[in-house]
Amino acid sequence: MTPGRLSLSVPLEGFSLPEHAEIAREAERLGYTDAWSLEADGLDCFSPLAVIGAATGLRLGTAIANVYTRGPATLAMQAAALAEIAPGRFVLGLGAGSQPIVEAWNGGRFARPATRVREMVQFLRQALTGERVVFRGETFAVDGFRLTRPPASPVPIHVAALRPGMLRVAGEVADGVILNWLAAADVPRSIAIVREAAARAGRDPARVEITARLLIHLDPPSPESDTLVRRYVTAYLNVPVYRAFHEWLGSAELGPMWEAWQRGDRRTAVAAVPERVVSDLLLRGSLDEIRERVQRYLDAGIETAFLNLSTAEPDPTRKRERVLDAMRSLGPRPAPSA
């Protein structure tokens, strides 16, 4: 593969958190450079990184910590804790998440996400130095918070972004951008907005790291597997932020799927997802084919790729074997058995 950092997206399916210590040590031997966590409705984004950070020298990143579901001071304290576990190796990835996560699950209000993220970055830049912070923003205010155990070195902050508004925020104030749910062919368009915003803000565009989570489905293609991945795509792309993202990308062929979903006809919506969309967004096939697809993202400008390994295999033993085999095969230095 051409130069680029390959990262594990954690937690891995089928494995307990304590097991991630040994898995991460093996991943490090295989040449993976990072572990980036996610959170939605399973585990929080900080705990897996604490386990991995204590066991390895991997760089750690949250992708993402939500700027609505945690208060500003809480985010600062959690970032400081991870930075203490992994000095100089922790990246705080922030994002707004989505309406269901913020409103339906956490009782918040999903409003002015780009402003909220920008202000959270501004606050955290100050707070993580250990200075007393009085912050008056448009979406929140903090009066007199001081972090009593600040990190020994600055914590890079990345911003998860889909459409131009948030992509510009990433370019203007963040150390990196986190991309998600896009085809390799769409990557240059997003990067261009980030780089242009950085340049307009007087920053070096090349210093804004471009990262992305790549969705890898390990099950062999079959009618059952095809239905499962179509359901997955349908569920995500009907969340308002992701629908708006793909409307911006120009995915007109998704219109029939969106219309069927709005009518409440879930079966027709799943069937209406075009094969091209499934193929563009989910990396499937043999491990050699998946490796080639990962390379397309690196060639398109992704500098750090988080490999999100998923399988619907119901048998726990086979599920674990499938995930580990993929990790070993896709690593920069494949295991001898692979």
Image (cartoon, rainbow, N blue to C red):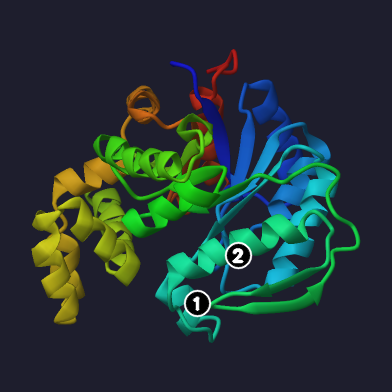
Which residue appears at 48% of the width and 30% of the height? 206
Instruction: Determine the image quadrant of residue 25.
Output: top right
- Label 2: few (<14), some (14–19) or many (≥20) C-alpha neighbours in 10 Å: many
Residue holding disc 2 = 120
Secondary structure at numbered mark 2: helix
Where residue 182 appears, as percent x and y from the top left, is 31, 46
Quadrant of res 297: top left
Disc 1 is placed on an element classified as helix
**Location of residue 38 in the rendering, given as x and y in whole percent from the top left corner:** 56, 55
x and y, in percent, of residue 41 in the image: 54, 68
User: Which circle's residue, 1 or 2, is located before the other in the chain?
Assistant: 1
Farthest top residue?
A: 336
Name the quarter where the N terminus is drawn. top left
Q: Which residue is mark 1?
A: 102
Please state the horizontal and vertical placement of residue 259, each as a whole percent of the image: 11, 73
Which residue type carries mark 2?
Met
Specify the farthest residue to the bottom. Answer: 107
- Cα–Cα span, label 1 and label 2: 16 Å
User: Which residue is pictured at 54% across the width and 51% down the height?
Assistant: 173
Asked whether the viewer can see residue 40, the reply is no
Q: Nearer the viewer, mark 1 or mark 2?
A: 2
**Side of 71 where 182 appears, left or right:** left
Which of the two residues, 249 or 100, is positioned nearer the viewer here? 249
Disc 1 marks a residue whose amino acid type is Val
Q: Nearer the viewer, residue 87 or 217?
A: 87
Q: Nearer the viewer, residue 313 or 150?
A: 150
**Drawn side of residue 154 relative to residue 193, left or right:** right
- Left/right placement of residue 232 relative to residue 44 reads left
